[in-house]
Image (cartoon, rainbow, N blue to C red):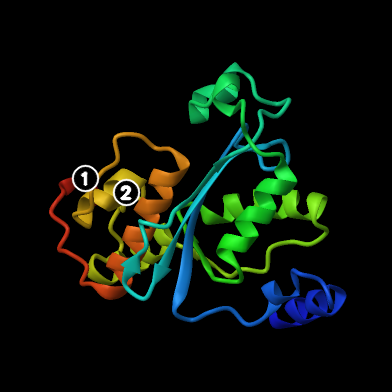
């Protein structure tokens, strides 16, 4: 969101508990975020779970995670369960969408959002926030696969680059997760971000990245 839109939304929300979200974002703190949804089409998808971890400078605050499940939406069917492995019974005590978003905003504030395919998550959250709260998220976005690609292309111009989450973690010597739920993927993206912004990029050894 550019400065003009940020200013306009701040003006529209004057006196609201959410006005602070449209202040200038922090330059030291970030939040890594991931969502599980019922569809890969953002126009049809409903939120099922949201997870996030804060990043302060070069530290991922694993002891303070945000990890919630929402009540099962009507769009939850066998096809979508294959995507996220969350069944109706797993969401029995889930929050309604408005409560989930209120808790999420209290956690992320106006910090930049880090993630893997973060633009998809942001679009889903924008749709939900507009519906439930009347405004979109103003948070700047940082896509870790793009950061990785840009750094690797400096090392290996014109090379084929595997941008899958597992391949990036493997190259950066980061732990691979046994399962890909929202919290584990948020943690993986956070670790990638810290590694790329505070460490050196290891030499690429795997032949799969070369033409």
Q: What residue is rendered at 70% in x and 29% in y?
A: 73
Horizontal side, residue 48 vs residue 19: left or right: left
Horizontal side, residue 21 vs residue 186: left or right: right
Tag 1 secondary structure: helix
Horizontal side, residue 127 vs residue 197: left or right: right
Q: What residue is rendered at 42% in x and 57% in y?
A: 64
Can the viewer see residue 35 in this picture?
no
Q: Which residue occupies the foreground of this view, 25 or 43?
A: 25
Total numbered labels placed on residues in the image: 2
Percent position of residue 68, x then y: 55, 43
Q: Using the rendered view, name the quadrant where residue 181 is placed.
A: top left
Furthest-right residue in this view? 12
For mark 1, what is the residue?
A: 208
Tag 2 secondary structure: loop
Measure how far apart labels 1 and 2 are at the Cα level: 8 Å
Image quarter in which the N terminus is found? bottom right
Q: Which residue occupies the foreground of this view, 143 or 25?
A: 25
Q: Residues within 10 Å of mark 2 (few under 14, many from 20)?
A: some
Disc 1 to disc 2: CB gap under 8 Å: yes
The disc at residue 162 is 2
Determine whether 20 is above or below 137 in the image: below
């Amino acid at each position: 969101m550019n400065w003009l839109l940020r200013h306009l939304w701040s003006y529209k929300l004057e006196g609201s508990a959410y006005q602070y979200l449209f202040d200038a974002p922090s330059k030291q703190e970030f939040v890594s975020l991931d969502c599980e949804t019922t569809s890969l089409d953002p126009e049809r998808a409903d939120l099922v779970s949201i997870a996030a971890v804060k990043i302060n400078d070069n530290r991922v605050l694993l002891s303070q995670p945000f990890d919630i499940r929402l009540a099962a939406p009507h769009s939850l069917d066998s096809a979508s369960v294959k995507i996220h492995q969350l069944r109706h019974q797993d969401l029995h005590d889930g929050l309604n969408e408005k409560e989930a978003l209120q808790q999420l905003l209290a956690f992320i504030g106006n910090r930049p959002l880090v993630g893997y395919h973060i633009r998809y998550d942001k679009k889903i959250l924008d749709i939900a926030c507009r519906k439930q709260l009347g405004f979109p998220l103003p948070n700047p976005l940082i896509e870790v696969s793009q950061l990785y690609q840009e750094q690797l292309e400096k090392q290996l111009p014109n090379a084929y680059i595997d941008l899958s989450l597992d391949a990036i973690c493997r190259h950066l010597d980061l732990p691979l997760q046994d399962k890909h739920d929202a919290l584990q993927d948020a943690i993986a993206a956070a670790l990638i971000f810290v590694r790329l912004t505070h460490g050196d990029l290891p030499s690429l050894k795997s032949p799969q990245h070369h033409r």
